[in-house]
Amino acid sequence: MATEATSWQKEQVSRAYVHVLATQGGYTICDWNVDKDGVDVTLRSRGLMVDVQLKCTQSPRVVRGGYSFDLDIETYDKLRDPDRSAPGHLALLVVPPDIGRWVTHHPESIVLACHGYWACLHGAATARSKGTTAISLPEHQPLTAKSMGAMFETARLLLNPSGREVN
């Protein structure tokens, strides 16, 4: 029988997952104690920043080509705001239904049985509903140390939309 995790357990495994990836990619990570701005963590790389809202689920909604997650409108609006100084992203971590399977211990390693996906919400359209909006997290956008580089590319383009070198 699967054991349903509490929200704090899901939050903590999401943070651990992102910390591991950021460390692997050489990025600095800042955890926010208060989720007032719709941001759980901020990643930094050579002066660029990206904001990430973390979500975790044991029962993902699978759609063609990936996953869908219902994000509350208040958080969605904060992450999509075009006036943000750092682009807002949603990261969804998918974990096994049984919390006992999340971590496997081996003599030479610890393995996390989870996978994540991300979506950039910066500049997204106004939501059509009042409560939540479905966010598409395509399977071709797995959350990895390498894909965090794509998040920073969005931040770079916001600073320099023309793509030209600045003197």
Image (cartoon, grey):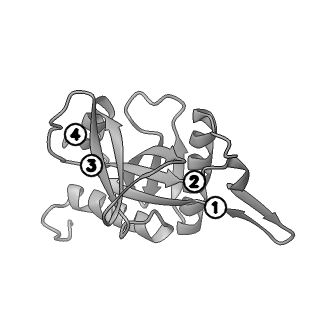
Residue carrying label 4: 81
Depth check, front residue: 65 or 164? 65
Residue 117 image offset from top left, x and y in percent: 42, 59
Residue at coordinates 57% horizontally, 40% vertically from top-left? 11
Cα separation between marks 4 and 3: 8 Å
Residue type of the residue flagged with mark 4: Asp
| Left or right, 150 with reference to 157 | right
Residues packed near mark 2 inside 10 Å, few (<14), some (14 to 19) or many (20 plus):
many
Circle nearer the N terminus (4, 2): 4
Circle nearer the N terminus (1, 4): 4
| Disc assigned to residue 113 | 1
Residue carrying label 2: 95
Depth check, front residue: 30 or 136? 136
SS at badge 3: loop
Circle nearer the N terminus (4, 3): 4
Residue 79 image offset from top left, x and y in percent: 30, 41
Depth check, front residue: 95 or 143? 95
Residue type of the residue flagged with mark 3: Leu
Residue carrying label 3: 121
- The answer to the question of whether label 1 and label 2 lie on touching residues, with beta carbons closer than 8 A, is yes
Tell me the quarter of the picture where residue 163 sits: bottom left
In this picture, is 73 found above or below 160?
above
Residues packed near mark 1 inside 10 Å, few (<14), some (14 to 19) or many (20 plus):
few
Residue type of the residue flagged with mark 2: Val
| Left or right, 152 with reference to 131 | right
In this picture, is 8 found above or below 80?
above
Q: Which residue lies furthest to the right in this view?
A: 107
